Amino acid sequence: MRIGELSRRTGVPVPTIKYYVREGLLPAGELSSPNQAHYDETHERRLRLIRALLEVGGLKVAAIAEVLGAMDDPGRPLHKVLGAAADQLGAAGAVGDDAEAEAAGAVVQRLIARRGWHSHEGDPAARDLARALAALSRVGHGAFLELLEEYADAAEVVARADLAYVGRQGPVEELVESVVIGTVLGEAVFGALRRLAHVDASARFFGRVEGQAEPEGAGAREA
Amino acid sequence: MRIGELSRRTGVPVPTIKYYVREGLLPAGELSSPNQAHYDETHERRLRLIRALLEVGGLKVAAIAEVLGAMDDPGRPLHKVLGAAADQLGAAGAVGDDAEAEAAGAVVQRLIARRGWHSHEGDPAARDLARALAALSRVGHGAFLELLEEYADAAEVVARADLAYVGRQGPVEELVESVVIGTVLGEAVFGALRRLAHVDASARFFGRVEGQAEPEGAGAREA
C-alpha cells in the first residue's frame, strides 16, 4: 500500500509516519518508483505498536527506539528484551544521597533477597522502588513500608499472569512483541484498575465513617 | 525559619520555593518585616509533599495544585479528595471512537458492574483502563483481556492494604495526606514492584525455555 493508505488505516498522519521512518522506529517502505514507497502489513502492525507505546504506555520516542531496537535484535534473549522495555518505564532520576535514600535502598535489596528475585546491579525497577520508598519516608510515611509484602504478593500474581499469557503466544516474533506490550500496556491497565478499586474501597470506607470517632475496620488487617 | 533555612532543610532552591508560593502550591510565609517572611514546619512538610508528588508521582505543577486544593478544602469528603488525586494520575486523552474503543468501554463497564465497584460517569480511571484495553486490542492483543480478572483481584488486594494503612493514621489532616500520598506514590511503588517481579519471572521462564520447542508451564494456568 502507499503511505496515504497506511495513514488512513492507522489514523497516523503522513508527516508523522515519515518522522518515525527518519528516527528509525519504522522501517522505510520499499521503493516502487523514485518517489513512491510501498508499505505492507508489517509496517501497519509496527505503526500500531509505536502508537500504543507512545499514547498509552507514555514512552518517549527515544525510549520506543530503544525498546524496538531490543525487539529487532535477533541475538538478544527474550528476558533481556523485557528488561529493555522495563528500563524505559518509570521515573527518571537518582534515588538521592540522604539517609532516607540509603535506608530505602537497603529495604529494596533485602526484599529482593528474601523473595529470591532475579535482579541486576543498577536495575531501574529497583532504583524506582527505592526512590518511591525514600520519598514516602521523607514525607513522614515510612510506615507505608508495612504494606510492602502485600504489594509484592500482588505484583507476583500479576507478573505470573502476564508470563502465562506470553507463554501461550505462538511464534517467537509475536512472543517478543507480547513481552513488550505486556510490560508497557500492562502497567497502564493495572494502574487504572488500582485507582478504580481504590476509589471504590475509599467510598465504602470513608463514605461510611466520616464524622465518626474511629474508622471501622482500622487495624483489622492484623486480626 | 527564613526561606534560606527552609531551602537548606528540604533541598529545594529558594527561587523554586518562591515559584510554588506564586502558583498557590505553598502558603506564603508570615511577614516578620516588609522584606522578610517566616516559615514553619507546616511549610516544610507541604514542600516535601509537593516534591514527592512531582518527582516520584510524576504529577505536573497544575495537577499538584488541584490535589492540594482538594486536600485543603475542609468541606470536601475524604473519598472525593482521593478521587481528585486519582484524576490527576494516568494518561491524558480520549479513548478513541473506533470499534475497539467501544468494545473496551463496554468491557470496563461490565467489570465494574460485576465487581460492584463504586464508579462515576466519566471516571478517569475507567477511561484510562478502556484506553489501555483498546490499545491492546488494536495491536492484536485483545486476548490480554483474559488476564483482567486476575489483574482486578490483585488491584483489590493492593487497594484494601492501602485503605487499611490510611485507616490507621491519626488526625484527619494526616488522613487526607495519607490518601493523597498512598494514591500517587503507591502507584510508583507497585509499578516498580511489578517490573521487578516481571523481569524475575521472565528470566526464570524464558531463560530456561529459550531454544526449546514448547515453553514449560504454558497453559498451566488453566489446570
Image: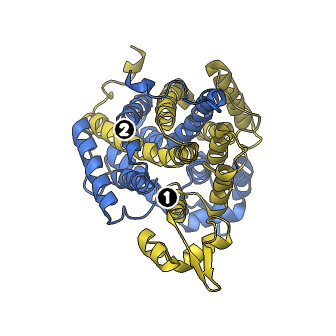
Chain colours: A yellow, B blue
The answer to whether one can see residue B64 in this image is: yes
Given the image, what chain letter belongs to the residue carrying mark 1? Answer: A
Given the image, what chain letter belongs to the residue carrying mark 2? Answer: B
B55 to A199, vertically: above or below:
below
Name the residue carrying label 2.
B146
Rendering coords of residue B135 (x, y %):
43, 56
Name the residue carrying label 1.
A52
Q: Amino acid at mark 2?
A: Glu
B203 to A51, vertically: above or below:
above
Of the pair B148 and B37, the residue shown nearer to us: B148
Q: Quick check: do tags 1 and 2 share a chain?
A: no
Q: Residue at x 77, y 34 (%)?
A: A121
Q: Residue at x 64, y 53 (%)?
A: A67
Query: Number of callouts in the render?
Result: 2
Q: CA distance from mark 1 to mark 2?
A: 19 Å
Of the pair A29 and A155, the residue shown nearer to us: A29
Rendering coords of residue B35 (x, y %):
68, 69
At numbered mark 1, what does the secondary structure look like: helix, strand or loop? helix
Rendering coords of residue A200 (x, y %):
30, 40
